[in-house]
Image: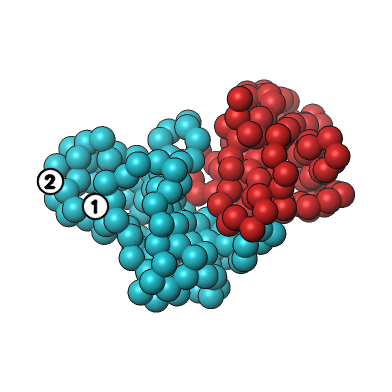
Amino acid sequence: KNEVEQSPQNLTAQEGEFITINCSYSVGISALHWLQQHPGGGIVSLFMLSSGKKKHGRLIATINIQEKHSSLHITASHPRDSAVYICAVSTGTASKLTFGTGTRLQVTL
Amino acid sequence: EADIYQTPRYLVIGTGKKITLECSQTMGHDKMYWYQQDPGMELHLIHYSYGVNSTEKGDLSSESTVSRIRTEHFPLTLESARPSHTSQYLCASSERAGIGFWYFGPGTRLTVT
């Protein structure tokens, strides 16, 4: 079992829909990261969370430390949101990230 | 604006050639990383550094080597390229241990013929 699990693996939505991507982890963490990767592109850090909730534009990330669970929400989705969204965790003082397998999102017109 | 740079972005090279993939960051981060990613696949850590003159092998066995002579520069070298090295190579840096924001370079897509 992976230490970081994401669901769903693939997601297709119509423009304007509200999207939720889930991430569960099984280890103690110091922070959880949400990353975005467009096809053929590099990776962009969207959020870093250690508690609570963060919002940036149409993106919202939440984390529940007790339940070891995080969600990434996209409101009013748009085709340009189509990308792979990756959850990753950093643990203790270790500086390495443990990555989830990613969620491939396709937003259609 | 990206503060972490990789060159070249694309490279096609023949088997047996020596190549160096460059990575530089202007943020003064001590921690830098190299990841390998095949299309549609997870990222695998191949090398990392916690500062100048500090380098470690990652989780994925790799025939590459790295050096860290300057804080801002973390090049990756393949002494003899093989078709199995065909992949995307991503460089990253982080602010500090544990809780720190991560920054990723745009990647180098390497094809070995």
Which residue is label 1 attached to? Answer: B78
- What element does badge 2 sit on? loop
Q: Earlier in the sequence, mark 2 or mark 1?
A: 2
Q: Are marks 2 and 1 on the same chain?
A: yes
* Side of A41 where B103 appears, left or right: right
A100 shown above or below A35: above
B73 shown above or below A95: below
Badge number at residue A107: none
Give the Cα separation between the discs numbered 2 and 1: 9 Å
Which residue is label 2 attached to? Answer: B16
Q: Colour of chain B?
A: cyan
Q: Residue A57: x, y in percent?
A: 79, 51
Q: Quadrant of residue B1?
A: bottom right
Please tell me which residue lies in front, A53 or A44: A53
Amino acid type shown at disc 2: Gly
Q: Residue B35: x, y in percent?
A: 44, 48
* Side of A53 where B18 appears, left or right: left
A98 shown above or below A16: below
